[in-house]
């Protein structure tokens, strides 16, 4: 099947893909992501849906993976913070390949090698995005720990200063 013919099934592919991604979340989270579509009440769900739609359109239109980084970021950033394993965080990209194969069977010749290679390149970019998000998260955590340690050291120094001042005021025998 030609890639452009795959667009005939775009909406159905997207809904199945979204459902598959949401299904990978814990039950309560998945329930919320499914039930609430309001962008303000559920920004994670909205970002997930928008990001997946943009990625799917990019795959079908042969857009370079580096142009899909912001869409990948919207989907993966939450997964990186939620402590998904790296393979689980980016699996959704490779799940798209299997989903497209299924739909290609409905229309004829199958998924082109070029389309599969695009998905694989996007999967590699998704891993890069995941790692960048994790690095940012660890950097933030390290900065918080450093700030806490500095705060503790400042309080200890103030306490020692007060103790020394108080010991100087106490008359010696």
Image: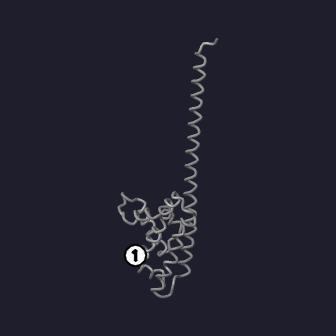
In the image, is 139 to the left or to the right of 43?
right
Quickly name the residue at label 1: 11
User: Which residue is at 45% across, 80% downward?
Assistant: 6
Is 36 rendered above or below residue 112? above
Which image quadrant: the C terminus? Answer: top right
- Where is residue 84 drawn, in percent x and y? 54, 62
Q: Count neighbours of disc 1 (C-alpha within 10 A) and say few if under 14, some if 14 to 19, many if 20 or more.
A: few
Picture coordinates of residue 76 (x, y %)?
51, 62
Tell me which residue sits at (50%, 81%) in the image.
101
Q: Foreground residue, 33 or 53?
A: 33
Residue drawn where x is 58% and y is 20% of the image: 165
Q: Residue at x 43, y 79 (%)?
A: 7
Foreground of the two, 32 or 58: 32
Point out residue 57 in the picture as x, y percentages from the top left corner. Answer: 45, 72
User: Residue 46's quadrant in the figure?
Assistant: bottom left
State the residue lying farthest toward the right: 173
Q: Position of residue 43 (x, y in %)?
A: 40, 59
- SS at mark 1? helix
- 103 in relation to 95, above or below: below
Q: Is residue 101 positioned above or below 132 on the image?
A: below
* Residue 51 in the figure: left or right of residue 147: left
Dividing the picture into quarters, in which one does residue 28 lie? bottom left
């Amino acid at each position: 099947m030609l890639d452009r013919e795959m667009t005939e099934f775009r909406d159905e592919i997207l809904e199945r893909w979204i459902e598959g991604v949401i299904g990978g979340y814990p039950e309560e989270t998945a329930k919320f992501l499914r039930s609430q579509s309001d962008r303000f009440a559920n920004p994670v769900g909205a970002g997930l849906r928008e990001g997946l739609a943009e990625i799917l359109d990019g795959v079908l239109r042969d857009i370079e993976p580096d142009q899909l980084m912001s869409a990948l970021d919207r989907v993966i950033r939450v997964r990186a913070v939620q402590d998904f394993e790296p393979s689980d965080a980016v699996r959704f990209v490779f799940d798209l390949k299997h989903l497209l194969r299924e739909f290609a069977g409905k229309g004829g010749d199958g998924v082109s090698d070029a389309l599969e290679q695009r998905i694989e390149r996007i999967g590699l970019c998704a891993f890069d995005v995941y790692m960048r998000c994790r690095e940012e998260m660890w950097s933030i955590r390290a900065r918080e720990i450093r700030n806490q340690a500095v705060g503790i050291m400042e309080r200890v120094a103030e306490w020692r200063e007060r103790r020394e001042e108080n010991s100087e005021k106490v008359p010696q025998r």
